[in-house]
Image (cartoon, grey):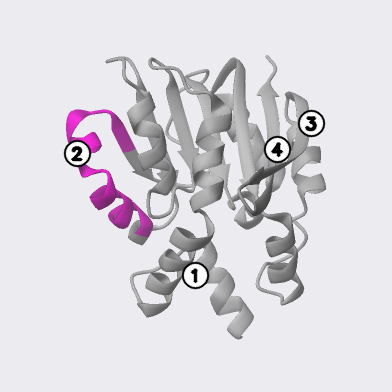
Amino acid sequence: MLANKINQQLSHPSKSLAGWLASRFFLWHNKVLEENAVKLLQIQPDDTVLEVGFGPGLGLRAAAPLLTSPKGKLIGVDYSEYMVSKASKAVKKHIASGKISLIRGNVLEMPLPNNSIDKIYHCNCYYFWPDLKAGTSELHRVMKPGALMVTTLKHSSIKTIASKSFLRGDNWQPELYMEALCATGFTDIRIQELKDGRTSFQAVFATASK
């Protein structure tokens, strides 16, 4: 029962004490992952960038200042109404200027045009997708040919959380995620061990082949 409740709040935080605690966990745990995912993407001023599962908005705040061209846009998709509300407050100036658009939606069915995104990033996110291949297929659909996607994670932390049954199934395993990427049209798929100060983490790179 407890494991199910924790899984629910990690995947879909609600406006509650548990949801607030989940958002505080994301702020503490995801900061390095979010900031490094943005750096690894090498965002250009006029890119159209998508973050999936943006949580309280750490990655949005890191990416928005890099889109200095009037053409540069940042789109965020998150399943949690509570996280959309939290992130909207964190980046309200960028939303007001039209630089950022936030969508409450499901990664399996995003209201975005085909071949419209230059770069995608997500952090500690894919473990919660009910169907890895359906998720990667939808991401591939919206990406332009040759578009880059970066996924960051702390494998050791996720493995520990999974061992306590706080994550359902085996989707947390990077190997299964990379297999789904390969099966849905991505190429140049690789995982890299990286470090930011004393913090070790992993990044998965994938290119949309079309």
- Dots 3 and 1: beta carbons under 8 Å? no
The residue tagged with tag 1: helix, strand or loop?
A: helix
Is residue 108 among what the camera can see? no
Main SS of residues in magenta = helix
Image height of 118 relative to 201, above or below: above
The residue pinned by badge 1 equals 9
Horizontally, residue 18 falls left or right of residue 171, namely left
The magenta segment is 83-101
Determine the CA span between mark 1 and mark 4. Answer: 25 Å
Graded by Cα atoms within 10 Å as few (under 14), some (14 to 19) or many (20 or more), the crowding at tag 3 reads: some
- Dots 4 and 2: beta carbons under 8 Å? no
Mark 2 vs mark 3, foreground winner is 2
The residue pinned by badge 2 equals 93
Graded by Cα atoms within 10 Å as few (under 14), some (14 to 19) or many (20 or more), the crowding at tag 4 reads: some
Tag count? 4
The residue pinned by badge 4 equals 204
The residue tagged with tag 2: helix, strand or loop?
A: helix
Residue type at mark 4 is Val
Residue type at mark 1 is Gln
State which tag comes first along the sequence, 3 or 4: 3
Question: Furthest-bottom residue in view?
Answer: 1
Residue type at mark 3 is Cys
Task: Look at 52% across and 54% down and name the residue there.
Answer: 30
The residue pinned by badge 3 equals 182
Determine the CA span between mark 4 and mark 2. Answer: 31 Å
Percent of width and height locating residue 29: 53, 60
Mark 2 vs mark 1, foreground winner is 2
The residue tagged with tag 4: helix, strand or loop?
A: strand
